[in-house]
Image (tube, rainbow, N blue to C red):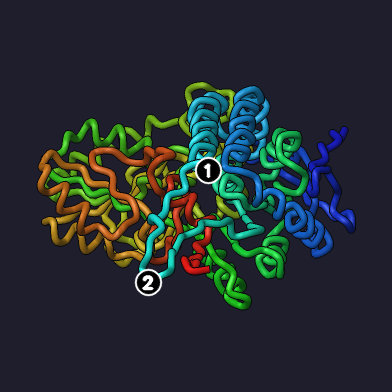
């Protein structure tokens, strides 16, 4: 007996719509492997309609005062709190994440981030006006860039939607946002929640696949394209956007080094690093996936980390004892499994290394030791609950190995030596360096990397400024 699937719809110009040609894709709950909904597989007519709506809405939204935009965003934040349980339910269905952790670890930061950008809307700072030429006064204007095409990932669908729309709308832009094709449910719900708060056309949601995203980026209307995703996707977006010189904002992959020195409290470090590596099934660009341990404590550290992994539980969303849920989709399960299956002979699986159960896409918390710097699993992003361990001799080698990858998003240093921590924070080539912790984020501080981890910042005043442009205005004092 078949169950009728829920129908998700695009949100364009203040109303929910099916794809113009009626095409849909099935949306699967990764905790069960079963479809629970259909979503539009949007094509060019749908993208055109969303872009036209955003373009029509832009002049009026651009001309609202910062106070008006702040008021709207504060209402959105309040509405998120009021609909928290609905958002949690949608996200759990999207991702299979634990219910309790989704409620406690995602809703409060999202609400806080929206409120931060509501405040940022009223605090656009610039250099003071002045006379830099006789008889002339110069001033600087910060303006919104226009329509923003935004693509969110599947690892944190609703939180990344907030990271996209909140700064853009706060700055006076209008938005066309595409969620991942595997996780559209919470983004469609967000459209429903904020639809009555924002004027029509300011916020639009278009569901679809990679081709839909490509159509958005290649479209003539957007002034900016923003994506959180893989390096491959980011390169494709940058290439497409270059054809008409759109602004590009890229938050891509990560391969965070976790450098543990011999003076570290091993028990405390293992506890924190295991959570930072396995949380959300390791599907986090900043996850503590690549541990470098000083050789004098290597064996003790590996044994403790393997024990922590063995005690880390994955399972169904309603199980209160689990730290993380499933991998997001069958392809991701295949990718993670493939890294383990292809390990070189010198590597050793200390814990995990296998799928859990035959229902959904669960994978055991895994620790791999004995690895070399040029091994595939060291150089490439696994994006799963897998922590690798390497042994280093001294600070110089630790820095060389930590920096010796294509990614440069996040890192951490574990030591009681303050001078060493300061040296390492300078020498590590990553957009974020945590000291004796790993993975906390706050709305006031920027998130973004270097190298193949992309460019541009999320969160903070820097992330807000990325959605603005600078204009010089000069006036004659003799006129």
Q: In the structure shown, which secondary structural element does the residue marked by tag 1 occupy? A: loop
Snapshot quadrant of residue 426: bottom left
Residue 242 spot, x, y in % from top left = 57, 75
Write the residue at 24% across / 31% down.
Answer: 268
Above or below, comparing residue 383 to residue 28 in the picture: below
The residue to which callout 2 is attached is 134
Residue situated in front as seen by the camera: 446 or 391: 446
Q: In the structure shown, which secondary structural element does the residue marked by tag 2 occupy? A: loop
Write the residue at 77% across / 56% down.
Answer: 56
Whether residue 10 can be seen here: no
Q: Disc 1 to disc 2, how far (Cα)? A: 34 Å
Q: Quadrant of the N terminus?
A: top right
Residue situated in front as seen by the camera: 312 or 344: 312
Q: Earlier in the sequence, mark 1 or mark 2?
A: 1
Label 2: how many residues lie within 10 Å, few (<14), some (14-19) or many (20+)? few
Q: Are marks 1 and 2 in contact (CB under 8 Å)?
A: no
Residue 374 spot, x, y in % from top left = 31, 67
The residue to which callout 1 is attached is 121
Residue situated in front as seen by the camera: 20 or 77: 77
Residue 220's disc is none
Whether residue 435 can be seen here: yes
Residue 300 spot, x, y in % from top left = 18, 39
Residue situated in front as seen by the camera: 294 or 76: 76
Label 1: how many residues lie within 10 Å, few (<14), some (14-19) or many (20+)? many
Q: Is 35 placed left or right of 429 in the picture? A: right
Residue 216 spot, x, y in % from top left = 69, 63
Q: Is 144 placed left or right of 474 in the picture? A: right
Q: Is 100 placed left or right of 457 in the picture? A: right
Q: Residue furthest front?
A: 478
Write the residue at 23% across / 46% down.
Answer: 413
């Amino acid at each position: 007996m078949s169950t009728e699937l829920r129908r998700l719809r695009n949100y364009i110009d203040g109303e929910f719509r099916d794809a113009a040609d009626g095409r849909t894709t099935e949306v699967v709950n990764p905790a069960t492997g079963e479809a629970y909904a259909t979503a539009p597989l949007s094509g060019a007519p749908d993208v055109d309609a969303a872009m036209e709506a955003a373009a029509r809405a832009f002049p009026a939204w651009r001309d609202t005062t910062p106070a008006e935009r702040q008021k709207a965003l504060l209402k959105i934040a309040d509405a998120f709190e009021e609909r928290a349980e609905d958002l949690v339910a949608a996200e759990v269905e999207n991702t299979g994440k634990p219910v309790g952790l989704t409620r406690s670890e995602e809703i409060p930061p999202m609400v806080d981030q929206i409120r931060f950008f509501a405040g940022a809307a009223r605090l656009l700072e610039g250099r003071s006006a002045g006379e830099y030429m006789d008889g002339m006064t110069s001033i600087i204007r910060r303006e919104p860039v226009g329509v923003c095409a935004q693509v969110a990932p599947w690892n944190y669908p609703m939180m990344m939607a907030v990271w996209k729309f909140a700064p853009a709308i706060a700055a006076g832009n209008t938005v066309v946002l595409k969620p991942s094709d595997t996780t559209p449910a919470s983004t469609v719900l967000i459209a429903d929640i904020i639809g009555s708060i924002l004027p029509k056309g300011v916020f639009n949601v278009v569901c679809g696949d990679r081709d839909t995203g490509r159509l958005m980026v290649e479209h003539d209307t957007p002034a900016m394209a923003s994506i959180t995703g893989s390096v491959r996707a980011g390169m494709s977006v940058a290439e497409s956007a270059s054809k008409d010189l759109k602004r590009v904002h890229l938050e891509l992959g990560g391969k965070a080094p976790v450098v543990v020195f011999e003076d570290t409290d091993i028990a405390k470090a293992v506890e924190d690093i295991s959570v930072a590596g396995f949380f959300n099934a390791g599907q986090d660009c900043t996850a503590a996936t690549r541990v470098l341990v000083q050789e004098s404590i290597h064996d003790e550290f590996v044994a403790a980390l393997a024990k922590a992994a063995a005690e880390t539980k994955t399972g169904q969303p309603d199980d209160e004892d689990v730290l993380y849920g499933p991998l997001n989709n069958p392809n991701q399960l295949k990718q993670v499994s493939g890294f383990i299956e292809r390990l070189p002979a010198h590597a050793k699986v200390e814990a995990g290394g296998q799928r859990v159960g035959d229902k959904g896409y669960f994978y055991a918390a895994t620790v791999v030791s004995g690895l070399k710097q040029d091994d595939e699993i060291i150089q490439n992003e696994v994006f799963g609950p897998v922590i690798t361990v390497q042994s280093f001799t001294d600070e110089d080698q630790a820095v060389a190995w930590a920096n010796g990858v294509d990614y440069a998003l996040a890192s951490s240093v574990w030591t009681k030596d303050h001078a060493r921590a300061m040296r390492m924070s300078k020498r590590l080539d990553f957009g974020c360096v945590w000291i004796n912790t790993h993975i906390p984020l706050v709305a006031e501080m920027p998130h973004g990397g270097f190298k193949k981890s992309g460019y541009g910042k999320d969160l903070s005043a820097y992330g807000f400024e990325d959605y603005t442009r600078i204009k010089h205005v000069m006036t004659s004092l003799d006129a």
